Image (cartoon, rainbow, N blue to C red):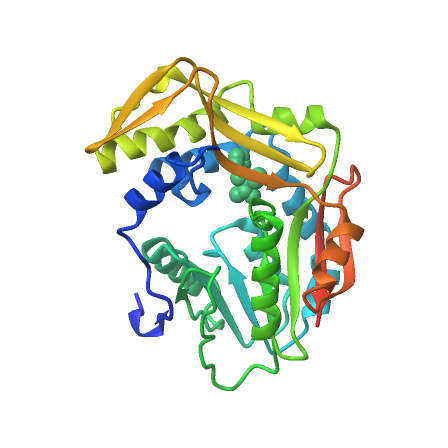
Amino acid sequence: MNQANVVQSTAVRADTFLDDVLDGLSRPNKSLPSKYLYDERGSHLFDQICELDEYYVTRTELAIMQQHATSISRQIDTDVMLVEYGSGSSLKTRVLLDALERPAAYVPVDISEEHLLNTAEQLRLAYSDLKVLPVVADFTQPFTLPDCEPPASHVAFYFPGSTIGNFTPPQAGKLLQQMASMLGQQGGLLIGIDLQKDTDVLHAAYDDREGVTAAFSLNLLTRINRELGGDFDCSRFKHQAIYNSRYHRIEISIVSLEDQVVSIGDHAVEFAAGEAILTEYSHKYTVAGFAKFARQYGFQLHKSWTDPKNYFAVLHLVI
Ligand code: AVI
C-alpha cells in the first residue's frame, strides 16, 4: 500500500465520543450525532440496507449513473482532478471512472483511514493508469487538495449517495460554501440528492419489514455499551422513522418504551416512556429547490439527470 500518497490534512479526533453522547443525551430534546451509527457493525448493516427492496436510494442512483454515464462524464471533461466525498468504495464511482476520459487524478476523501486505503489500493489495481491520491480528512472541515503532476486543468467534486440529505440546511450550506471556495472558477460539483415522494415509500425505506434499519439504529446503543461502558437494554427501546412534511425530511429516532434510567460509565441518564433520541435526518429535495439552495453558496445548476419515477436526481452544479 502506498502510504506516501496519503495526505492527512485534518486531525481526526477519536476521544470525543463520550463528550458527544453525554452532551446529546443531556439536552431537553435528546439527540446523538449520526456519524456514530457507522462503527464496523453499523457500516455492515448500512450495506445491508442498501440491498433492501424498500431502500430504493442506492440502486436508483446507480441506475441513473449507468444510464447517463456518457452524458455525466462529458460535463466533467478531460484532465480533471475528481475528488470524491467518501471512500470511493461504491459501484457508482467505478461507473464514473469507466466513463471519464483521461482523468488527471482521483482523490477519495474519507475520515476512516483503513477503509480509505483499502479502497484506494483496489482502485489502483483496477485502473492501472489512474493516479489515486487518497486524503484522510473529515470533509465537513476544509482540507487541502493534493498536488498532482502534470497538474489537472480543473477540479470536480463528486458527492454521491444523497449524504447531503443527512445534514441540516445550515450544515449543508456550510459544506457547499466550503466546496465553492475550494473549487476554482472552472470547477464543478456532481451531487446525488434524494427527491420528495410519496410518504409511504419513504416510511418503508426507513423502517423496513425485516428490521434491518431498526437494527442499524439500535446498534448505536450497543456501541455506547461497548465503548463507553453503558448499560442500555435494546429491548426497552424501539426504532422510529417519521416523515416531517414541513421540513421534507425523514426523522429517525430511538424511542424509550418505558420510564428508565441508563448508566453510561459514571453518568446516569433518565428516559421517560415515549421519549425519543433523534439520531438522523434524511432531507428530501426537489431539483429546483436544491438548485435554489445551492445558488446562495455560489453554485448554478448546469444539468440534472433523474430516473423514470423521479425518485432521485444527480445534479451537476458549476461555479
Ligand atoms: C447515508 N444516508 C444517505 C442514508 C439515508 O438514506 O439518509 C442513511 C440511512 N439511514 C437509515 N437508512 C439510510
Q: Position of residue 194 (x, y in %)?
A: 67, 43
* Left or right of 20, for residue 184: right
Left or right of 133? Residue 196 is right
Vertical position of residue 293 compared to residue 21: above or below:
below
Picture quadrant of residue 101: bottom right
Number of numbered discs: 0
Q: Nearer the viewer, residue 37 or 80?
A: 37
- Furthest residue in direction top, as rendered: 258
Q: Quadrant of the N terminus?
A: bottom left
**Please, is residue 237 above or below residue 151 in the view?**
above
In the image, what residue occupies the spot 49% across and 71% down?
130
Residue found at the far front of this picture? 28
| Residue name at image x 73 percent, y 38 percent | 196
Residue in the image at 61% along x and 66% along y? 177
Question: In this rendering, does residue 54 appear at all?
Answer: no
For residue 182, side relative to residue 70 (left or right): left
Report the front residue among 171 and 60: 171
